[in-house]
Amino acid sequence: MYRFLLSRQWVILTLLGVALVPVMIELGFWQLHRHEARVAHNELISSSLRARAVPFAQVSQGKRGPAEDDQFRTATATGRYDTAHEVVVRQRTGADEQSIGYFVLTPLIQRDGKAVLVNRGWIEADGDLTRFPDVPEAPDGEVTVTGRAMRDETSEASGIKDKRGLPPRQVMLIDSRRQAEAMDRPVVGGYLQLTDTTPKPSGHQPEEVAEPDHSSIGPHMAYAVQWWLFAAGVPVGWVVLVRRERRDRLAAQGAEDAGGSEDRAGSGGPASGPDGAGPSDGIGEGSEEGTGAGAAGQRDTVSSAGAGGPPPSAV
């Protein structure tokens, strides 16, 4: 009764289910790995933020800045701001994650002549995006800045396209090597995301960049479980469909057998007579008539004998 599984439709359906199960399992593990990576990243940020402050040059040894394990580490640098080479980074959101504006990127010239790029914070964009915006002035004199050590930004990591032909002193990505070319001065790889300045600056300053989120784990674990449930549901659904198909076929076969039995019973019965009565009707009538006549004759004979007269045969 399961020969229907060899039909083209069921073979395709079965092969599709066999192909989907490992794909769904693999997608589940992919989401699990993303969950684990997110948890590890959160732990890295948390431990880096809790670590004691170190000189920025100590953690920024590579060309792109701090190593992965040192990213978000609290670091310090001392020097004077070079506002002549200050630039703004376009299309950045504020703390409300809705307002669009700029990051203010100002070089800090250290005593050894090397510059450290400092992201001083966020300012809101005005109506004219083709000109350099009004930027709060950087503190004068020598200052010590404290911030989160960050790697240079790339399009691959940030998803931001590095556009060319922008208005003067505007960039899309924070890139220490490009700024070194523009300044014609050595620049320490990476940059500092400002959190504090000593001495405290007077006057209005850019809005401090919010601390990175290191508490949310995202929906990846839920997606992993969801994919695995889908993988388990494929064979269960296949069995349900097979049982339903078998039940429907058995019901159709039973109805077909019942119809055949009725047809055979109707074609094998006695034929009807010309007037619609069956042969048994004629035989019944004749028998009843003969029987009635014989009974009447016997009653007449008995009546004659009782009256004293001769029997009908003697007359």
Image: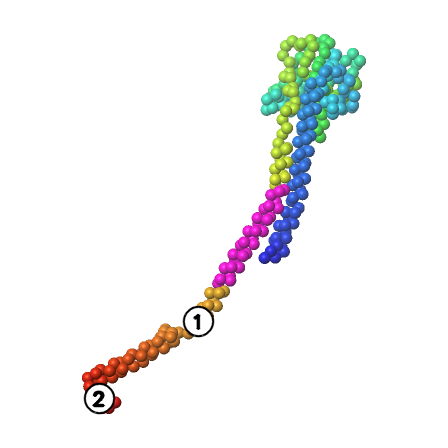
Q: Nearer the viewer, residue 18 or 93?
A: 18
Q: Secondary structure at mark 2?
A: loop
Res 217 → quadrant: top right
Q: Give the x, y percent position of residue 261.
A: 48, 65
Residue found 71% across the figure and 18% down from its top = 51
Q: Nearer the viewer, residue 278 or 315?
A: 315
Which quadrant is the C terminus positioned in? bottom left
Choose mark 1 or mark 2, whichever is in front: 2
Residue found 46% across the figure and 65% down from its top = 262
Per the model, the C-alpha gap separating discs 1 and 2 is 53 Å
**Residue 178 as seen in the image, left or right of residue 261:** right
Q: Nearer the viewer, residue 238 or 61?
A: 238
**Residue 138 as seen in the image, left or right of residue 114:** left
Res 43 → quadrant: top right
Residue located beneath label 2 in the image: 310
Magenta residues, start to end: 231-259
Q: Give the x, y percent position of residue 95.
A: 61, 21
Q: Secondary structure at mark 1?
A: loop
Scheme of colours in the image: rainbow
Q: Give the x, y percent position of residue 114.
A: 78, 16
Residue located beneath label 1 in the image: 269
Residue found 62% across the figure and 21% down from its top = 94
Name the magenta segment's main secondary structure.
helix
| Rendered position, 65 above or below 303 | above
Residue 223 sits inside the magenta stretch: no
Q: Nearer the viewer, residue 77 or 211?
A: 211
Q: Give the x, y percent position of residue 19.
A: 66, 46
- Is residue 180 visible in the rendered image? The answer is no
**Residue 310 as seen in the image, left or right of residue 148:** left
Q: Residues within 10 Å of mark 1 (few under 14, many from 20)?
A: few
State if disc 2 and disc 1 touch (CB < 8 Å): no
Amino acid type at mark 2 = Pro
